[in-house]
Image (cartoon, rainbow, N blue to C red):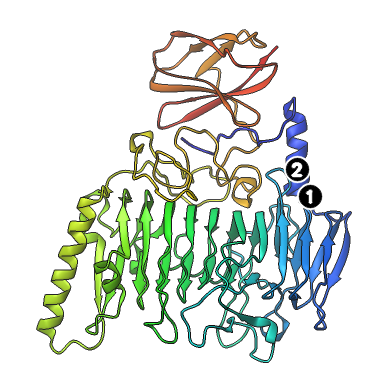
Amino acid sequence: MTFGSEYLSEVKMNHFISCVAVFLFLFLADFSASGQVVISDDGSGTGTTTWTNDNTYILDGFVFVNAGDVLTIEPGTVIKGQTGSGADASALVVARGGQIQANGTAEAPIVFTFEADALDGSTPFNVRGQWGGVILLGNAQLNSSPGETQIEGIPDTESRGRYGGEDDEDSSGSVTYVSIRHGGTDIGAGNEINGLTLGGVGAGTNLEFIEVISNADDGVEFFGGTASIKHVVTAFCGDDSFDYDEGWRGYGQFWCTVQEEGEGDRGGEHDGGTDPEDGLPYAHPVIYNATYMGRGSDAGRRALTFRDNAGGEYHNSIFYNWGKGVDIENLASGEDSYERFANNEIAFAGNVFDGCTGLGLDAGASDLFTITMGSGWSSAADSTEAADASAAALEASFAGNSNVVTASGLNYAISEGSGLLDLVPSEALLGGTAATNPWFDQVDYPGAFDPSEDCTWLDGWSMLSARGFLGCSTYIQEAETSTFQIYPNPSNGAFSVRFEANLANAVIRLVDLSGKLVFREQVNAASGRVVECYAADAVSGMYIMSVENGAETFHARLIIE
């Protein structure tokens, strides 16, 4: 499936022109007609207020939502941070006890970016570090002593930068359909800001449909807490994609990362305690349905690293195009991440590894796992013996929990507008391990995206979709008349597809403008063959037909009257 040939966004319109108009308003306008409101903070913070979508809000420095205050941001609102570093850096910080209600929609996402971004597609995806990012601080538990600390990047003299406490159900508000772009500025001493930072954020916080694009540091980082997050993507970030520290114990599902060739570090950098390293509670998040696309084999970049007593679980996930697989720290003291594995606090089940370790599909479990032997071993022989035993245990666990090394069907070629970034796995990979916790959606595929759907959950609202990297946006590439023809068109729901080319194992799909599938059939299409189709549940309106044969996808519009 190739997403350069794309479908319409999930917009309930009756015709193509209206849909394009909505797309242009949301993503290509420079919002110059909107009023600009500069927001600075003298200590009083934002107060309890609403930022409306008829204004563009300019962050002048660090702006806080103070304890007891609620910042509401309307769908479609644009917030821009002033460009600068060090003392001139800008960011939005929700302090402990404050809340943010930033709930965009698929049709009207909330966008955070830097002041000079015209939002017209002219800013390259490799522009990073232009402003800070979004920081949420809460009262949930950490494993650092004494149980609260200062978030990185904010001076100790600023009391609103503290996070951590005893309330694991704490709420910092709700963030949905939000795109955070081009952040991660250096705020001093080589300390960059993450795109989205979650410090001690509790389980009462709602986080879903979030995009972090082109951040100079990590995409998303958790510092302790119990926050959970669904439908999140990081892309083209300069450091790690997903990072956690200080005992994070939340859940994650439908995570995706895409790294630029030559940029970025680990897909997941997973640390346990900071001070002390063996502090409790241990980090033990559970993640289902991740898709991690790496930068390739250069520089040995790892899909995952576990160290400093960090635990964690990955289920039904895809790791593609990484220089190395999984690295687990093993110290002589026994207080390390390998100890977490031995106690069933690190687990891998139902995962797919494709193109990792630079060995492609020839890699086995022994190639995927690296045991980093830390300090304290009395001799090289002891260290070697322990490493061999650890590797053997990991390999046995890998094989016994439905993990495989196989082709995923993903496609990696980063080029803006190329249409060659395909995140949807092959339908041959259907299956996986069932989640027992009711927080997780029960799905029957690995990775973040459903192989039976022609559109991804990134469609329409994300920058990846708007800039032509993927998704099913408003750009439709019509089928060549030499490929297939539809008649009659308009139709009453019964129509014929005549193939003018040989397309073995072709899949015919018909979807409405919301992305709902109304017809599907697999055929062996020889030149001249006519396939009779009937969309029994279709109502009047415009539909998009695709014909896919694995290597190519062709599209056409069909009107049903």
Q: Is residue 115 visible?
A: no
Q: Is residue 502 above or below residue 111?
A: above
Tell me whether the residue at label 2 lies in contact with that at label 1, contact meaning CB atoms closer than 8 angstroms: yes
Q: Which residue is mark 1?
A: 29
Number of marks? 2
> Residue at point 76% right, 51% down?
75
Neighbours of disc 1 within 10 Å: few (<14), some (14-19), many (20+)? some
Return the x and y of residue 534 as percentages of the image width and height. Answer: 54, 10
Q: Is residue 440 above or below residue 455?
A: below
- Left or right of 343 in this view: 48: right
Q: Secondary structure at mark 1?
A: loop
SS category of the residue bearing label 2: helix
Residue 392 located left or right of residue 505? left
| Cα–Cα span, label 2 and label 1 | 6 Å
Residue annotated with mark 2? 24
Q: Judge whether residue 97 can be spotted in this image.
A: yes
Picture coordinates of residue 510, whole percent (x, y): 56, 22
